[in-house]
Amino acid sequence: QIYLYQNEFVAKEALHISPEDRGYYFGDGLYEVIRVYNGKLYEAGPHFARLTRTAEALRIPLPFTEDELSAQLEKLIQVNELHEGSVYMQITRGAAPRSHPFPASAEPILMAYTTSYQRPVATLEEGITAVTTDDIRWLRCDLKTLNLLPNVMAKQHAMDQGAGDVIFHRSGTVTESSSSNVMIVKNNVIKTHPANNLILHGITRLVVLRLAKQEGIQLEEAAFTVDELLNADEVFITSTTAEVTPVIQIDGKAIGSGKPGPLTRQLQTAFEATIPSK
Ligand code: PLP
C-alpha cells in the first residue's frame, strides 16, 4: 500500500507523522473522500472545490493547485492499482509545539491513500435501519474538518442500538446522517435540508438533486421535522460510499411499506447510469 505524503509516494511503513501534528492534537485539518469507479476519480471537481472552500475557511494554505493534486491522486490510484474504492486525503495545519493559536511557521501536511472495496450492493438493495439522535455538532457542519467526534459517537450509538446509522436533528429539525445526507419523499416530492452551515454539502446530494431534476421529480431544498421523517413515504441517504441507500425503518417504525420505495429505486438506477463503465 503506497501513500502520498506531501509530494512523495511512500510505503505506509516508511511514513512518519510528527506527534506534534496539529491534526493529532486538535483535529486541526480537513479531509476529502473521492470515489473511484473503474480506476477513475468520480466527480473530482466538486470534491476539490469543497476541499478548497474548507481550507480557506480554516485558513490552511493549500501547498498545491487543484490540477497538481488531481494528477498526484491519479498517480496514487495507478501505483496502488486501484480499480474500485476510494481515495482518502487529509491536510493538517502542520506540526508545532502544542499551543492553540496558529503557529507562526508550520508547513501543512498532506497525506492520501487508497482503499479498495466494492459497491455496497446488499444495503443498496435491502436498505438500512436508522435511529434519530440529537445533532450536538458545531455550527460549521458545512466544513469537512477532521473534528468528527460527535459523528463517531453518533455512529457508535447507532451500532449499539443495532441500527445502520443515525439521523441527526436539531430541536426536531432533521439535518443529515453521521456521514451522509438525508432525503425524504412525501407525495412524490423530495425534501432535503438546504445546503447551509448545518449540513455538509454532499457531492452525492448534488448529483442526486441533478438527477431528480433530469427525471422530472419535484424537489424542495427545505428543512423538515422528525415527524415528517417518520411519516415519509420513502427515506434515503446519500454519500460517496453509500450512493443512494434506502432507509426502511427509523426508531423501530417502518417507513412507507417498509421496503425501498419507487422514487428511491428510480434515483438508484439514474445514479448507476452516471458511473463510468470503462
Ligand atoms: N454528511 C456528512 C456529515 C458526511 O461526512 C458526508 C460524507 O462523508 C456526507 C454528508 C456526504 O457527502 P458526500 O456525498 O460528498 O460523500
Image (cartoon, rainbow, N blue to C red):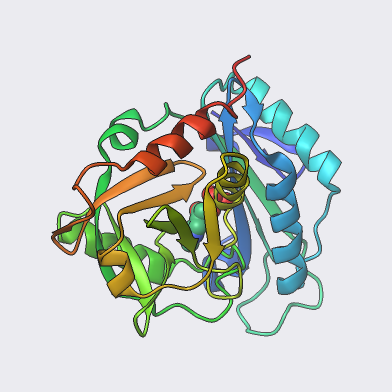
Relative to 115, say whether 141 is above or below.
below
> In this image, 146 relative to 178: left or right?
right
Relative to 147, say whether 65 is above or below.
above
> In this image, 219 relative to 122: left or right?
right
Q: Which residue ends up furthest to the top in the rendered image?
A: 278
Q: Nearer the viewer, residue 34 or 214?
A: 214
Relative to 130, say whether 120 is above or below.
above
Q: Nearer the viewer, residue 268 or 239?
A: 268
Residue 130: x percent and y percent? 25, 57
> In this image, 123 relative to 32: left or right?
left
**Tally of marks:** 0
Q: Nearer the viewer, residue 27 or 263?
A: 263
Q: Identify the residue at image location x=52%, y=70%.
A: 222
Residue 71: x percent and y percent? 79, 33
Q: Identify the residue at image location x=69%, y=84%.
A: 101
Residue 244, quarter of picture: top left
Q: Identify the residue at image location x=54%, y=63%.
A: 220
Residue 167: x percent and y percent? 33, 65
Q: Identify the residue at image location x=53%, y=36%.
A: 13
Q: Is residue 16 visible?
A: no
Q: Is residue 57 visible?
A: yes
Residue 126: x percent and y percent? 25, 36
The quarter of the image holding the C terminus is top right
